[in-house]
Image (tube, rainbow, N blue to C red):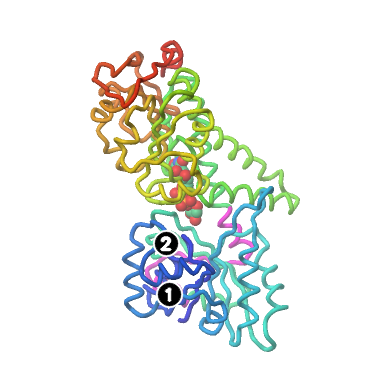
Amino acid sequence: MRLTVIGTGYLGAVHAACMADIGHEVLGVDVDAEKIRALTEGRPPFFEPGLDEVLTRALDSGRLRFSTSLSEAAAFGEVHFVCVGTPQQAGSDAADLRHVDAVIDGLVPHLSSPCLIVGKSTVPVGTTPRIAARLRGLAPEGVDVEVAWNPEFLREGFAVEDTLRPDRLVAGVTSPRADGILREVYAPMLDAGIPYISTDPATAELVKVAANSFLATKISFINAMAEVCDAAGADVSTLADALGHDTRIGRRFLNAGLGFGGGCLPKDIRAFTARARELGVGEAVSFLRQVDDINLRQRLRTVAIARDLVGGAFSGHRIAVLGATFKPNSDDVRDSPALAVAAAVHREGGEVRVHDPEGIYNAHLAHPELRYEDDVLTACRGADVVLHLTEWSQYREADPVKLARVVCAPRLVDARNNLDAGLWRSAGWTVRTLGRPGPATVPAPQRGGGALGHSSARGCAAPAEGAVLSRAPK
Ligand code: UDX
């Protein structure tokens, strides 16, 4: 089939490449000429494992092209996928649909043959009929255009896998014709037994926000438990393991720590709350406000633990930050909890050195005031505390003995509960986490290099020991 994919960000670029990979003729369209040039040359404009290979394969097959022209898209496609961003509106919780509307306004007047417009972007429930009404006023006389909603559930870092082998496909349609077209688009997936749920557009739109709300709630639930564990001297990781054995609950998305961020979960729960209020059912989803609050509190708690570890104030202290992206295997720093913590520490006068394997370019654009380092050792050199904020595998593989030699004082906040705390402690580190108890006795902070011979590029300001010990893990 001849498909267009309009909007070639994290969602659209992967969708375009994967649709060509399964045999369709695809035209990817974006307003950003630089992005289109990169994609045409086979260079993904962002980091996504496995995308290079699929993109190259699709371009080499001759089935994938890119353009900046919506009129070219109109002439080319039988099906037009809308994959543009729906960010949070400035000054409001609601979603900003201006990019979706711009695509409709730019595409529909150029249409000359029957086609289906399929929204994939996450939108407030009720968007499909609104778009249908909008395009009725724009479509040329006699051209049969329909709209359907087919939400995307892909996770960054697994986007190719999630697009080629999704857990399920959801089609929000208003006619058997639209349903038939979508079944044809996804025929290889349907043949492979992937569940296909055909429903009305409102349900399809809601599936997406409901799924993200559920995931966000699960994460905030375990983070609330982490706070209780901290107060009670219990271990949230063991708690999550034990809960997870209950197949009704499941272990996934029960990793306590710094919480969720990224381009979807935070803005989706806010937009859902705003839309529910418009529908007069704000009360029904009012718990999402608390989900959001618990999530944001993890950032404050992480800053507070780090502040305590350096004696009550960041000023005059060097803070190493490991991780800038909102999660590993992505270069995305949108609403990144890690960067939010780094920026807060900087605002409080800390001398922050950030490392990230893939996110430094984007992090620098978002927070030019922070200092970025290309390798972990350099970021940690002379640090009074190391903050582990994004669980990249290379941090788990880092040698705590080696790192202890370069820091000013071996203090670690593992805000992702993902490092081997025992290993770090046996290398002399004071380790603090969110929701996990430490040993009964904590090594006293080391002065001037400490027992492991820590060197420092500068004089190490010793923290007030009382402050560190009074906040020692239970
Ligand atoms: C999410 C949804 O998973 C996906 O289905 C949807 O299409 C888009 O939004 P994504 O934003 O890529 O995908 O990230 P996800 O893997 O869901 O993680 C979201 C955030 O939650 C990350 O910041 C992650 O670090 C955090 N998280 C996840 C936790 O804090 N604990 C967990 O147990 C799991």
Q: Amino acid at mark 1?
A: Ala
Quadrant of the image for the N terminus?
A: bottom left
First in residue order: circle 1 vs circle 2: 2
Frontmost residue, 311 versus 251: 311
Q: Main secondary structure of the magenta part?
A: helix
Q: Residues within 10 Å of mark 1 (few under 14, many from 20)?
A: some
Q: Residue at coordinates 69% horizontally, 88% vertically from top-left?
A: 141
Frontmost residue, 55 versus 435: 55
Magenta stretch holds residue 161: no
Can residue 422 be seen? yes
Q: Residue at coordinates 62% horizontally, 77% vertically from top-left?
A: 146
| Image side of residue 304 versus residue 108, left or right | left
**x and y percentages locating residue 20 in the rendered image:** 40, 74
Which mark identifies residue 45? 2
Question: Which of label 1 and label 2 is nearer to you?
Answer: 2
Which mark identifies residue 445? none
Is residue 174 depicted above or below 214 in this figure?
below
Q: Residue at coordinates 46% horizontally, 67% vertically from top-left?
A: 34
Region in magenta: 184-209
Frontmost residue, 427 versus 211: 427
Q: Amino acid at mark 2?
A: Pro
How far apart are the two marked residues, 1 and 2, measured between alpha carbons?
A: 29 Å
